[in-house]
Amino acid sequence: MADKLGVVAGDRLILLLSGSIPERRQFTVAGIFQTGMNEFDNNLAVIHMTDALQLTKREGPDGVTIKTIDAMQAPSISRAAALGLNGQFGVIDWTQRNRNFFFALKTQKLVMFVILSLIIAVAAFNIIATLVMVVVDKQADIAILKTQGATPRSIMKIFIVQGIIIGLTGMILGDILGIWLAHHIDSLIGLVESTFAIKVLPCDVYMICDFPTDIQWSDVALISLLAFALCLTATIYPAWRAAATQPAETLRYE
């Protein structure tokens, strides 16, 4: 803000407080501070409490700020404080103050789930294509198995098991790779930044300098189950097509 206004310590500024009767007050810049967060550094200025009370025509402060040891406990502490005050005062915590931000995160998480599901669906279609090609390539072998007494159910089991093995292998490897990346994302981002001389997360813009990771095992399990279910579903059509092979028609030109 000081850079935009072109002021340094010792310069004078006029503060205009809008209202029915605008208030004007001249201030002297006592010092310039930097929080490292772009949102605050662009919009935040601090004045003395006495001057603030005079400008707002108040006798004293109308609120207090409480800092908790554990920031994640703020919602429960605010609820307890509101009950203890019997509704005489309003209580708001940092999660309520930044409600739009958390709503955006929740929406982003839902969108990422949909995108990831579509990626898994594409992989499932690849399994369908692979098994269909196997069925076409192995039609003669399937016909021979049928002539030797193999039932359509047993033929279906063969291709369903093959599809399950492919799906389980991909699911397990994907889980291992994803969990490893989550645990080592900071070092990988640091490597990218040092190699290409870029800053992936500027601290003054995003308010964080690294990627904090917290693996939600319930989400990992949900995605894994979804992947397995799609892979299992993808095997049904190729297996049915293999089971429907007619030995006489297939072996006629062999």
Image (tube, rainbow, N blue to C red):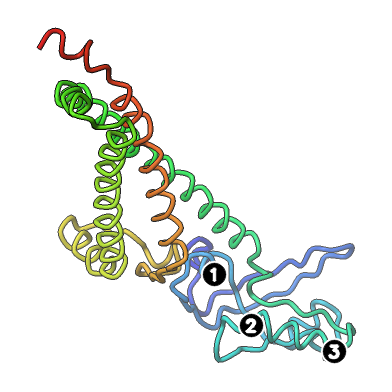
- Which residue carries the number 3 mark? 85
User: SS at mark 1?
Assistant: helix
Q: Amino acid at mark 1?
A: Phe
- Which residue carries the number 1 mark? 40
State which mark lies toward you, 3 or 1: 3
Residue 202 is situated, as x and y percent measured from the top left of the image, at 36, 63
Q: Amino acid at mark 2?
A: Ala
Q: Earlier in the sequence, mark 3 or mark 1?
A: 1
- Which residue carries the number 2 mark? 74
Of 9 and 20, nearer the camera is: 20
Of 23 and 98, nearer the camera is: 98
**Residue 132 sits in quarter:** top left
Residue 252 is situated, as x and y percent measured from the top left of the image, at 15, 8
Q: Residue at x 64, y 75 (%)?
A: 94
Which residue occupies the extreme left position in the image? 254
Q: Residue at x 43, y 50 (%)?
A: 226
Marks 3,1: beta carbons within 8 A: no
Q: Left or right: where does residue 196 sit relative to residue 70?
A: left
Q: Residue at x 28, y 41 (%)?
A: 163
- Disc 3 crowd, CA 10 A, few/some/many (<14, 14-19, 20+): few
Vertical arrangement, residue 36 with respect to residue 245, above or below? below
